[in-house]
Image (cartoon, rainbow, N blue to C red):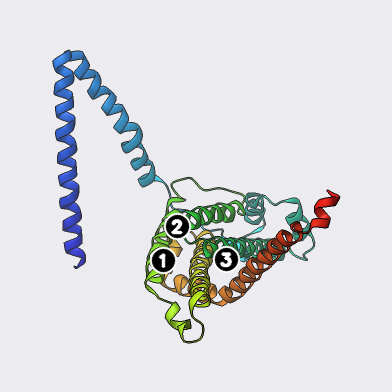
Amino acid sequence: MNRKTLILCAVALFTIVTISLVGNIITIADKASAIHPWVGYGFYIVLGLFLARFVIYPTLRFLLTPELKGDGRDKIEEMDEGELARYIKRLALTQEEKELFAAQQTTVEGVKEVWRNRDSEASKVVRRAALNVFIVTGISQNGSLDIITAFGMNLQMINRLVGLRHGRPSLTQLLELYVIVIASALIISITDDILDQIDTSELFGSVAGGVAGSLAKTFLSSSVNGAMNAYLTLRIGKLTMKYLELGSKNFKHNSKRIRKEARRSALKELPAVAKEGLNRVVSTAKESTWEKFCNLNPLKRAKE
């Protein structure tokens, strides 16, 4: 199915839904008018106010919202003293950043150091989010729960990355970032379905059967699931960082290159995240088992 066919189908579906809604509205208005003419007028007034507040106003606000601009770090060397002073003021430096800024020899180097520090903090936020997603979705055996968990954690990660700018964009400007998360959440559901089709017990059946094969299947499936979700979180984080750096216009113009770089960067960091996640899960399981074993000690119970 080509693009033209898809557009025609979408237009046809929208037309059918619109006609159905208009028909229902007219039917309700006629019934209201049968009670009293002013009841019918009141219904249309309430409907008009509802459409104006929740449909027309948000649509116009979204269409008229200016595109999110980049952080302008690529232009600091071209700024004069006055422009650079205003730029630094817009950065809203924290006390720690002011100390980093003051430690540099020139104003330009100070600004660059501030951005290097913010990028480092942003990378830590992304990696921490990916680690949490790996652990939670790796342990979970519920695909729907994985989608909800990853979706919520990715939204939280994006909000934290935006917070590092010390200047929040409007809600409509954040919509494009959230669309990235929604699309990735849909990909997570697809990967879960694919993993469910893989019978990993066949891979281990010749080596270990019965309970061992079942445990191997569960462990491998959970690990792969967690790794895939962590990869998507890493990629979303890298794309978000670039989006905030370049702005929506430049991001769209260079989207192909940026997505390629984000994919490479995410794949490069994934092994370390997966290793740390597995180590945490194993260590937590050992500690939990040891505590349960110690609680069985009759001497400890007698002392209590």
Helix, strand or loop under label 2: helix
The residue most toward the bottom is 206
Helix, strand or loop under label 3: helix
* Cα separation between marks 1 and 2: 9 Å
Q: Is residue 173 left or right of residue 89?
A: left
At a point 46% along the width and 53% down the height, the residue shown is 148
> Toward the viewer: 257 or 17?
17
User: Circle 2 sits on which residue?
Assistant: 147
Q: Quadrant of residue 271?
A: bottom right
Looking at the image, is mark 3 or mark 2 earlier in the sequence?
A: 3
Helix, strand or loop under label 1: helix
What's the amino acid at mark 2? Ile
What's the amino acid at mark 1? Asp
User: Residue 80: x percent and y percent?
Assistant: 64, 59
User: Residue 190: x percent and y percent?
Assistant: 37, 65
* Cα separation between marks 3 and 2: 37 Å
Pointers 3 and 2 in contact (C-beta within 8 Å) = no
User: Circle 1 sits on which residue?
Assistant: 192
User: Residue 100: x percent and y percent?
Assistant: 76, 60
Q: Nearer the viewer, mark 1 or mark 3?
A: 1
User: Circle 3 sits on which residue?
Assistant: 74
Q: Nearer the viewer, mark 3 or mark 2?
A: 2
Crowdedness near tag 3: few (<14), some (14–19) or many (≥20) residues, C-alpha within 10 Å: few
